[in-house]
Image: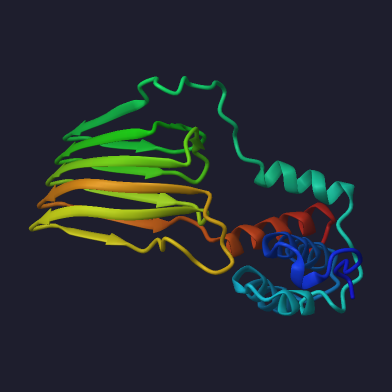
Amino acid sequence: MALDTTGVKLEDRPIAQVREEVIDQLIMNYSHGVISEQAFERRLDIATNSDEHLLLAEQVADLTLLPDAKYRAMWAQSFAKPQPKAERGANAADSDRLVSVLSSDERSGPWRVPQQLTIINALSSVELDFSDAVFDQPQVTLYTRNWLGSIDIKVPEHVAVLSDINNIASSSSNSVSSDRAGVNKTHFIRIEGYSVLGSVSISVKRSLTERFTDFANSVRSALGLK
């Protein structure tokens, strides 16, 4: 069996640790042409959604190629998260406002997320992309004041979102679950406020499975494989 079963019994190990090792081995073997794209996608889907130790181990039972130093370096470059540059005092005010009137505003890339963010939107389009955002706090609150505008919020899979928005002749949708098997939620966003004759949309920008697949294909390209 390719997965290391020495030491602590497999079923007693943290499931997140086992899953990480399995995904590493799947990417390593697919990127080196050991398994087909179809087999990789099928096994990766099981690995990212299962909480069963033995089922995870089965996905790499016939694979012997292990991640090397080059693979680790590429992984760190692709998945390392930006770190906060400075610590704030426990009592320091940490809030910000985004005001958009008859315009279009976007926050994306490695932007710093305050503990409280108020969005005042009138006849405008606002997009918040948390995919590469830097969180100083594990919990964040967004306050929406939306009139005749649209607010589009995109988050990565490790962020949970709870939406509590009062709609007046408006629409709001939240396709981000607060919990999901196989996904470790590290941050929590609560959205409060109201929307009048507007729309608020909350969704996952890119799933972990898609990110893993893109990374595996980048490794294949680096090795000269198509």
Seen in the picture, residue 29 relative to 105 is either above or below; the reply is below
Residue in the image at 29% along x and 47% along y: 191
Residue in the image at 49% along x and 32% along y: 136
> Is 143 left, or right, of 76 in this rendering?
left
Residue 110 pos. (x, y %): 52, 34
Residue in the image at 59% along x and 34% along y: 82
Residue in the image at 81% along x and 64% along y: 25
Toward the viewer: 24 or 57? Answer: 57
Seen in the picture, residue 225 relative to 54 is either above or below; the reply is above
> Is 44 left, or right, of 24 in this rendering?
left
Label count reads: 0
Residue 193 pos. (x, y %): 19, 45
Toward the viewer: 37 or 133? Answer: 133
Q: In which quarter of the image is the C terminus?
A: bottom right
Q: In which quarter of the image is the N terminus?
A: bottom right
Colour setup of the view: rainbow
Seen in the picture, residue 124 relative to 178 is either above or below; the reply is above
> Is 156 left, or right, of 145 in this rendering?
right
Residue 102 pos. (x, y %): 16, 35
Q: Quadrant of residue 225?
A: bottom right
Residue 40 pos. (x, y %): 72, 73
